[in-house]
Amino acid sequence: MQTMLLLANEGTDFSLSGMWAQMGIFAKLVLIVLIIQFVITLIMSIERLMVYNKAKSQSISYIMMLRNFLNERKLEDAVAAVKQHSSSPVAKVVGSGMDEYLQGLEALQEEGPDDVGDFDIVDAVNRQMERTKERETANLKKGLALVATTGSTAPFVGLLGTVVGIINSFQGLSSDGGGGLSSVAGGISEALVATAVGLIVAIPAVMAFNYFNSRVEGFQIDMNDVASEVINYVLKEGRY
């Protein structure tokens, strides 16, 4: 308590505005970088959350419709319904498989000068859905690398500010000829603020990345499950 009063009497202001005013240019740049990282990560997290929630609701809706389409053999309707569920990765995977299946049936029934003979329609459907799953997985992961980068680099950016603050503290000691605590208070405050802000930015970013990554894995499981059902349907109904 006596130390804090002494520092206050010697002109050291520990309020946020006071510490900002006492910071050097480099420390301010470090904080600005951390704030920019935080804002970008926040915007990206909100955008991904909206995308995943919409994709989940549309996937559930499409899967409920798909059961009726397959039971009634309305494959054209299953493909057409994808347009109404454009945000669903599951719908896009199934739609691509069903469309490939219908085109394969037409190709098997046609003969001409360019006919190359029979082909494995099941393999064609499976390969088409695999390509679509890879593309949709990449779309779901869009922006997550930025969130992960913030979570991994923000502590080091804050540590850089900490190191610079400590350097400034030692410079203050040398310039004062070994003066009192007030000569290092400004540098120490820069170091502590930079460290704290770095952690404040990094911790939510890491948590957000882990959460979104688990959501992506859930979508991958859904796409694989539904794709397997489509392959089973093709095996039962579509091999001639």
Image (tube, rainbow, N blue to C red):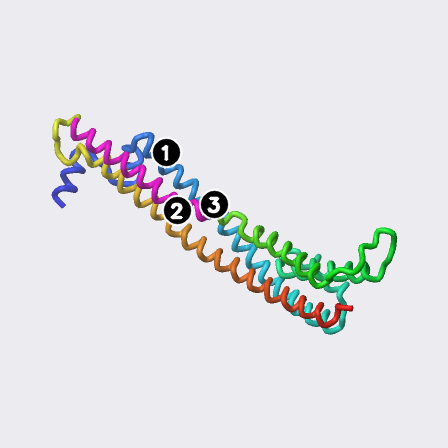
The residue nearer to you, when weighing 94 against 126, is: 126
Sequence-wise first label, 2 or 1: 1
Q: Residue furthest front?
A: 117
Q: Where is residue 158 in the image (x, y as percent from the top left)?
A: 33, 41
Q: Mark 2 points at which residue?
A: 152
Query: Residue at left 16%, top 30%?
Result: 173
Tell which circle, 3 or 1, labels the residue nearer the N-terminal end: 1
Is 167 magenta? The answer is: yes
Can you say whether 54 is above or below 13 in the image? Answer: below
User: Residue, x 36% and y 36% (percent of image)?
Assistant: 30
Q: Do the residues under discs 3 and 1 have CB atoms within 8 angstroms? A: no
Relative side of 180 to 48, left or right: left
Asked whether 124 or 10 is in front, the reply is: 124
Q: Is residue 42 above or below residue 17?
A: below
**Neighbourhood count class around disc 3 (C-alpha, 10 Å): few under 14, some 14–19, many 20 upward:** some
Residue 10 visible in image: yes
Q: Could you tell me which quadrant the C terminus lies in?
A: bottom right
Say what amino acid the circle numbered 3 marks: Leu
- The residue that mark 3 highlights is 146
Which quadrant of the view contains residue 227?
bottom right
Image quarter of residue 178: top left
Kindly state the secondary structure of the residue where label 1 is placed: helix
The location of residue 231, given as percent across then percent down, is 67, 66
Instruction: Considering the whole magenta stretch, tell me its main secondary structure.
Output: helix
Amino acid type, mark 2: Ser
Q: Which disc number belongs to residue 29?
A: 1
Which amino acid is tagged 1?
Leu
Magenta stretch: give its range: 147-174
Q: How crowded is mark 1: few (under 14 residues within 10 Å), some or many (20 or more)?
A: few
